[in-house]
Image: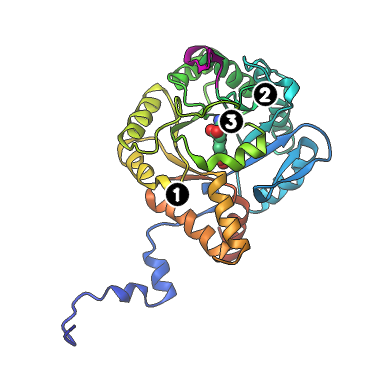
């Protein structure tokens, strides 16, 4: 039994009032922490909900303005672009991925032109352009590394030529960060950032995203290039390599199941760390929220603060707009 008057340290004192809790809070969320992913499709007047991602949409370029306005009002400054390509444009070389007039390149130009304040990050990987739904070129059933890196370099350069501020290689090929950095240097792009998906795991949480882009692998899985979920030190090795190859920010993906890796990277690397709360994480929170098995809003905010607590500076999340809007409404001076 606790003896009255003998407790010197009462941990509950720092929790007793909301003001004290706010004073001693060790992590904070701010709208500037978020990167909002955007899914872009061909056509005009298209705004279609992704069935496995409730309240999340694919937009044709002409429909982006409403979404960008809302993101701006919520205080979001950064968007990460993905495209859904038509079957006719898919092949096994990724040729169309580097088309200066491709969907991605047109979307970049549109945003740069009409919303120049947004920081534009772009996904660099071949899966939306691959007849096999793989992140690279397939030869004899194998995703080959070095040929893929050549294609990724061309893809990245075409994004930057269109106006991308950052490129985000999500493919997990070896050496792609160095190759992209060299190419950017050679082309005189000295202000372009590389957000490397460094510790990207072969996760079952990407399902809804693959629905969104129609990019599920046609054969096999991605385990020969994405990381094994059993591994932790390997994530540090990947991140240190990417850092040494010239990455400016390092990403852990998925987020919630891999917070130990977020912590590891934040302690072992000097680059800023990003975490990607992926489509399956979003879908689970939305589904349980819709059933009212959890309080969706509260779980959303708790999931996001967990990334900050674990050590990530930046959070890529499909909740970006909603969470930022909440923060703005509740802390209007943000
Ligand atoms: C593909 C890519 C994927 C995601 C981002 N880029 C899927 C995959 O690797 O198969 C997943 C994002 C998400 O699930 O939200 N290069």
Pick whichever of labels 3 and 1 is earlier in the sequence: 3
Please say whether residue 108 is one of the residues in the magenta stretch.
no
Residue at mark 3: 123
Q: Viewed as shown, does residue 289 lie left or right of 105?
A: left
Q: Quadrant of ligand 1?
A: top right
C-alpha gap between disc 3 and disc 1: 21 Å
Neighbourhood count class around disc 1 (C-alpha, 10 Å): few under 14, some 14–19, many 20 upward: some
Q: Nearer the viewer, residue 112 or 308?
A: 308
Neighbourhood count class around disc 2 (C-alpha, 10 Å): few under 14, some 14–19, many 20 upward: some
Please provide percent x and percent y for residue 47.
77, 44
Pick whichever of labels 1 and 2 is earlier in the sequence: 2
Asked whether the viewer can see residue 324, the reply is yes
Report helix, strand or loop for mark 1: helix
For the residues bearing labels 3 and 1, Cβ distance under 8 angstroms? no
Q: Viewed as shown, does residue 207 lie left or right of 252?
A: right
Please provide percent x and percent y for residue 77.
60, 44
Pick whichever of labels 2 and 3 is earlier in the sequence: 3
Closer to viewer: mark 1 or mark 2 = 1
Neighbourhood count class around disc 3 (C-alpha, 10 Å): few under 14, some 14–19, many 20 upward: many
Asked whether the viewer can see residue 79, the reply is no
Residue at mark 2: 162
Q: How is the image coloured?
A: rainbow
Closer to viewer: mark 2 or mark 3 = 3
Q: Residue at x 60, y 27 (%)?
A: 218
Vertical comparison of 75 with 152: above or below: below
Residue at mark 1: 256
Q: Based on the displayed image, in which of its 4 quarters is residue 59 positioned? A: top right
Q: Is mark 2 within 8 Å of ligand 1?
A: no
Residues in magenta?
136-147
């Amino acid at each position: 039994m606790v003896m009255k008057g003998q407790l010197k340290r009462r941990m509950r004192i720092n929790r007793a009032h909301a003001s004290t809790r706010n004073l001693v809070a060790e992590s904070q969320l701010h709208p500037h922490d978020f990167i909002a992913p955007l899914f872009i499709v061909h056509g005009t007047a298209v705004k279609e909900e992704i069935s496995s991602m409730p309240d999340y949409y694919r937009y044709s370029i002409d429909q982006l303005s409403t979404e960008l306005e809302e993101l701006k009002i919520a205080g979001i400054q950064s968007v990460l672009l993905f495209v859904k390509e038509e079957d006719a444009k898919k092949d096994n070389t990724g040729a169309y991925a580097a088309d200066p007039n491709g969907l991605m390149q047109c979307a970049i130009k549109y945003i740069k032109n009409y919303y120049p304040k947004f920081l534009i990050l772009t996904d660099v990987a071949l899966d939306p352009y691959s007849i096999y739904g793989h992140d690279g070129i397939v030869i004899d059933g194998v995703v080959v590394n070095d040929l893929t890196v050549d294609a990724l370099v061309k893809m990245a350069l075409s994004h930057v030529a269109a106006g991308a501020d950052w490129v985000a290689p999500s493919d997990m090929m070896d050496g792609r960060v160095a190759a992209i950095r060299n190419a950017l240097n050679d082309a005189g792009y000295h202000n372009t950032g590389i957000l490397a998906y460094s510790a990207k795991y072969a996760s079952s949480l990407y399902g809804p995203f693959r629905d969104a882009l129609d990019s599920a692998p046609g054969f096999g899985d991605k385990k020969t290039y994405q990381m094994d979920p059993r591994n932790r030190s390997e994530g540090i090795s990947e991140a240190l390599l990417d850092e040494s190859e010239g990455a400016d920010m390092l990403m852990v993906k998925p987020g919630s199941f891999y917070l130990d890796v977020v912590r590891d990277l934040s302690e072992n690397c000097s680059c800023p760390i990003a975490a990607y709360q992926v489509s399956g994480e979003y879908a689970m929170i939305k589904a349980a929220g819709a059933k009212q098995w959890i309080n969706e809003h509260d779980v959303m905010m708790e999931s996001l603060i967990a990334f900050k607590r674990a050590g990530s500076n930046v959070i890529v999340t499909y909740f970006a707009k909603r969470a930022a809007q909440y923060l703005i409404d509740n802390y209007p001076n943000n």
